[in-house]
Image: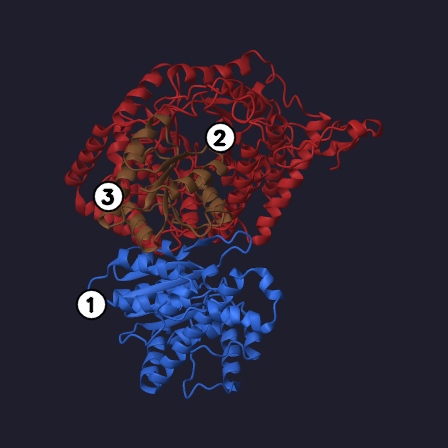
Chain colours: A brown, B red, C blue
């Protein structure tokens, strides 16, 4: 349980309404000992960044199944930077085609998680990413 | 029901088997486990064997295909092409801003304009979508929910302007708001006023566009999210009950509106469970409509449903496996008695289907229809010991879940409180854990996977940045050119009608559409009165 | 209150996190005389399901709208199985989404054993240093929590619902008599009037040392966004406190509780970290172990 005590924000940016993946991961993180905040649907990157900062989370997960992952990651990073919080690690999950993974990493995502991955794998990768510096 | 084992084989007994819904599957089922009275005759209560006495001989199922999406102009071109090839049914996917009630200029909407469907922000876009198409000669299906009443009003306004009689219009709007709160997310208003809007649209359609199906109550989305087959039916029928109750509350007559209620579901891979699920659903729905609600017209009790074969049962890995899956599911759909079938393309899990894969999906249905012979007689599995046993078991399980929800206070309360959402999250986790651990086999993924398999790559989302600008330009032009006073007046009248409980809002929405009021404006007028839905806390 | 320096949210946020994770050994260093400027603190307690979160969100938003800088420290229950938690449902509420004068921090109850610990007292002092005008503290439930809340805040609000009959029974045993304002939430439900009557009945019989403050019982309906007389009741108690409370005595009592909880925490940490063989030793040896490990401030 090395996610114990980690504060994690799971967010649904934009208009995408498929939330079962975000809910599954929120519950799994809680059961792994983390303190998780789930934003619910239809949140703007501005709002997400504000909550990430105020709640001082260790990780921010963006759950996106609408195809707008490039734009939403970029907007979220901009909002975090504006709040002096560029150090908060961002994870992108959902329907992310393999050919987009590298571009998202290059754009600042710490890891990409897709729905085929097992929960154990996601938790392990998250834990690893949180121990990495920068 | 206990597994029946012959004592002499007990020592060599296989591990216990059950369906994904948790019904235990005996090694052998015999006549003593079947109740002949519950089987009945096709076309007669309890409708176990089907809603029509002649099954598919009387009418074949509809083979639905999506027409793709893009701008209204591109869709219009595609529709005219398909109609030229003899297709008579069109399906329209809307973009997320239209679905969620935002204008294309709204900041929250801008990134999503035109991405997953057409932007239909006002009547002028609807007119472009159906330019040079005779609305009286086609059937149009809109996958729209939160703004379904508005889109229906817009379609009617387009027909009005084209001089097409409303009574000639055929098609469907999904209009199933309850499942949106739980599994699809294009809700807008709180539950109760949304129910009022759904009822208004159905009652209006019954009268003005009687050939139009004003609702398609869906289990597909909760199923795709991860619930079991039994839960899929139970949650959907509970939603059906909620709609019927609201329609009655708004003054509807069951023998008028019930025959225009239809359903749709997924078909997944447990072959017999899927067949049994549909047979059980027919019985339960008929019992509700004829028994509890006392409808006298037999047509009111007919459980009409469409299905999607594929969805989350398909894999990106070893995609050709999906051809087999869809074929099996298609057969289950037919043996279960579906009225319309959509077969997913085998590559749908990792890209927008190609022409070839879309064609193969259609050929699958045609092979089932014309080569397999399974549709030549009604309910060929009727009387099978196992299928009847499984139908009875599914019925019992579905009933038990429906009772839990009724005891909670019904679908509306359960959704407002987050009870259904909690159940769904739990089932989804169970399913995910079972797949992760390999307990639930997915061939090519957790069994028989190939190590060096190349990751499938294809185009998943269509990106057309130019289209967004053109949509916004057109939107702004409409607002500049319309009679703003008339638009505002129509919105004001809508608002006043929404303040009260007595009036049907549809005529007001039609008037708003005629005045080129936008989707966002109509929604804002209603939001000012009703507020916005607030999701209940996550439990699980 | 607009002459405050602008709120540095990132800075505040990091300080709060550090305070929430501080060990007793670290906290004892910060115990000392109270700051001059202090936010007015309102504690909310009451059983789960009473709608505290929604009520607090609406209240906080209403107060922030009148240009007060408002902070919310909200404690959500940790899972007894995994130790993890789902926090912060309140952050989703539209009322709180946009307000620049409102700051919310959600905490798992794991950080607040049996109610509240020195960490929370420390966090409240951090809010003071960032010039908050009002701070709302939301706790997990009733019972022992109540006493701790009382020591830390100026006004204690107990939120009940028409179904809270059991809680009223507990009140009769003197446990829950110490609130300053009583709220019957979800008052659109049946039995609201009866519960109000029951509470008033218990309060009339109570002989607790309120020194003249008559706790009002107000009804609210958070789902209808009706705060009723709650704002008025809070303003009244604040005015009464300012006129009647011996401020110095109050601060000393609060500081005593603060020190007590930090020391208790430190003792607990020493006990947890001690090799278990220690407890075979004599009482004097065990005591000596504790004394040597108690860290005085400044070390």
Front tag of 2 and 1: 1
Residue C227 location, x and y as percent? 37, 68
Horizontal relation, residue C106 to residue B399: left or right: left
C254 and B371: which is toward the camera: C254
Does residue B314 sit above or below C256 in this rendering? Answer: above
* Residue on which the image places disc 3: A78
- What is the CA distance from the residue labelled 3 to the residue labelled 2? 34 Å
Residue shown at the point (26%, 66%) measured from the top left:
C130
* Residue on which the image places disc 2: B312
Which chain is mark 3 on? A
Horizontal relation, residue B48 to residue B448: left or right: right
From where the camera sits, is residue B164 visible?
no
* Residue on which the image places disc 1: C4
Classify mark 1: helix, strand or loop.
Answer: loop
Classify mark 3: helix, strand or loop.
Answer: helix
Question: Dot 3, how many residues are within 10 Å of its Cα: few (below 14), some (14-19), or many (20+)?
Answer: some
């Amino acid at each position: 349980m090395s996610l114990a005590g980690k504060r994690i924000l799971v967010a649904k940016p934009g208009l995408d309404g498929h939330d079962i993946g975000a809910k599954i991961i929120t519950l799994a993180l809680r059961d792994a000992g983390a303190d998780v905040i789930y934003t619910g649907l239809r949140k703007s990157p501005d709002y997400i960044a504000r909550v990430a900062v105020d709640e001082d989370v260790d990780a921010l997960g963006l759950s996106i199944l609408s195809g707008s992952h490039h734009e939403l990651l970029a907007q979220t990073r901009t909002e975090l930077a504006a709040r002096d919080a560029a150090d908060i690690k961002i994870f992108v999950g959902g329907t992310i085609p393999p050919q987009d993974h590298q571009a998202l990493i290059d754009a600042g995502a710490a890891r990409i998680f897709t729905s085929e991955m097992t929960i154990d794998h996601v938790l392990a990768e998250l834990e690893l990413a949180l121990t990495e510096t920068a | 029901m206990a597994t029946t084992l012959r004592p002499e084989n007990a020592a060599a007994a296989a591990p216990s088997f059950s369906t994904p819904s948790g019904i235990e599957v005996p090694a052998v089922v015999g006549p003593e486990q079947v109740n002949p009275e519950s089987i009945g005759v096709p076309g007669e209560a309890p409708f176990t064997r089907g809603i029509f006495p002649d099954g598919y001989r009387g009418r074949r199922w509809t083979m639905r295909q999506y027409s793709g999406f893009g701008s209204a102009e591109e869709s219009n071109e595609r529709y005219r092409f398909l109609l030229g090839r003899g297709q008579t049914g069109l399906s329209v996917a809307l973009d997320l801003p239209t679905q969620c009630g935002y204008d294309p200029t709204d900041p929250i909407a801008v990134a999503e304009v035109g991405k997953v469907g057409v932007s239909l922000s006002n009547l002028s876009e609807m007119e472009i979508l159906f330019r040079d198409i005779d609305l009286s000669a086609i059937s149009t299906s809109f996958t729209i929910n939160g703004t379904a009443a508005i889109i229906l009003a817009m379609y009617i306004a387009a027909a009005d302007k084209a001089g097409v009689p409303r009574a000639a219009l055929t098609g469907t709007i999904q209009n199933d708001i309850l499942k949106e709160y739980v599994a699809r997310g294009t809700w807008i208003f709180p539950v109760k006023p949304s129910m009022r809007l759904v009822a208004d649209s159905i009652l209006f359609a019954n009268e003005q566009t009687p050939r139009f199906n004003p609702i398609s109550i869906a289990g597909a989305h909760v199923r795709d999210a991860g619930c079991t087959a039994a839960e899929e039916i139970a949650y959907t029928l509970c939603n059906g009950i909620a709609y019927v109750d609201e329609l009655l509350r708004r003054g509807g007559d069951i023998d008028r509106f019930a025959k225009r209620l239809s359903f749709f579901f997924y078909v997944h891979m447990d072959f017999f469970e899927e067949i049994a699920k549909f047979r059980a659903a027919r019985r339960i729905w008929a019992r509700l409509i004829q028994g509890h609600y006392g409808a006298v017209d037999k047509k009111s009790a007919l459980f009409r449903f469409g299905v999607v074969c594929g969805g989350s049962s398909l894999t990106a890995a070893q995609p050709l496996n999906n051809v087999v899956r869809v074929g099996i599911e298609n057969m289950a759909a037919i043996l279960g008695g579906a009225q319309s079938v959509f077969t997913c393309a085998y590559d749908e899990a990792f890209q927008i289907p190609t022409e070839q894969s879309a064609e193969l999906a259609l050929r699958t249905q045609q092979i089932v229809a014309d080569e397999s012979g399974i549709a030549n007689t009604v309910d060929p599995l009727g009387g099978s010991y196992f299928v009847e046993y499984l139908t009875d078991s599914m019925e019992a399980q579905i009933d038990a879940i429906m009772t839990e929800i009724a005891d909670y206070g019904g679908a509306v309360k359960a959704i407002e409180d987050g009870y259904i959402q909690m159940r769904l999250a739990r089932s989804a986790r169970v399913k995910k854990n079972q797949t992760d651990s390999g307990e639930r086999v997915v061939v090519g993924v957790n069994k028989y996977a190939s190590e060096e398999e190349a990751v499938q790559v294809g185009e998943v989302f269509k990106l057309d940045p130019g289209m967004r600008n053109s949509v916004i330009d057109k939107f702004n032009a409409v607002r500049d050119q319309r009679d703003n006073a008339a638009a505002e007046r129509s919105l004001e009248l809508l608002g006043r009608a929404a303040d009260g409980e007595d009036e049907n809002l549809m005529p007001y929405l039609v008037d708003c559409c005629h005045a080129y009021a936008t989707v966002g404006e109509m929604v804002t007028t209603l939001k000012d009165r009703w507020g916005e839905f607030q999701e209940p806390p996550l439990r699980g | 209150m607009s002459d405050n320096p602008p709120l540095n949210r990132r800075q505040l946020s990091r300080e709060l996190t550090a305070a929430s994770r501080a060990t007793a050994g670290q906290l004892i260093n910060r115990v000392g005389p109270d700051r001059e400027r202090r936010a007015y603190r309102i504690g909310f307690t009451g059983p789960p399901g009473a709608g505290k979160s929604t009520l607090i969100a609406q209240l906080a938003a209403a107060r922030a709208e009148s240009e007060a800088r408002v902070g919310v420290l909200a404690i959500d229950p940790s899972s007894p199985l995994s130790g993890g938690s789902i926090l912060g449902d309140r952050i989703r509420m539209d009322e709180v989404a946009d307000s620049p004068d409102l700051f919310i921090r959600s905490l798992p109850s794991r950080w607040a054993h049996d109610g509240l610990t020195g960490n929370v007292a420390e966090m409240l002092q951090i809010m003071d240093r960032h010039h908050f005008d009002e701070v709302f503290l939301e706790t997990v439930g009733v019972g022992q929590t109540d006493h701790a809340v009382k020591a830390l805040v100026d006004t204690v609000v107990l939120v009940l619902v028409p179904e809270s009959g059991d809680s009223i029974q507990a009140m009769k045993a003197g446990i829950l008599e110490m609130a300053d304002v009583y709220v019957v939430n979800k008052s659109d439900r049946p039995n609201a009037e009866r519960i109000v009557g029951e509470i008033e009945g218990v309060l009339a019989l109570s002989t607790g040392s309120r020194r003249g403050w008559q706790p009002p019982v107000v009804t609210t309906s958070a789902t209808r966004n009706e705060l009723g007389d709650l704002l008025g009741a809070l303003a009244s108690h604040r005015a009464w406190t300012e006129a009647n409370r011996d401020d110095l005595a109050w601060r000393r009592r609060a500081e005593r509780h603060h020190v007590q909880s930090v020391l208790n925490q430190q003792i607990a940490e020493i006990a947890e970290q001690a090799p278990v063989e220690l407890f075979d030793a004599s009482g004097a040896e065990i005591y000596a172990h504790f004394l040597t490990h108690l860290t005085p401030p400044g070390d």
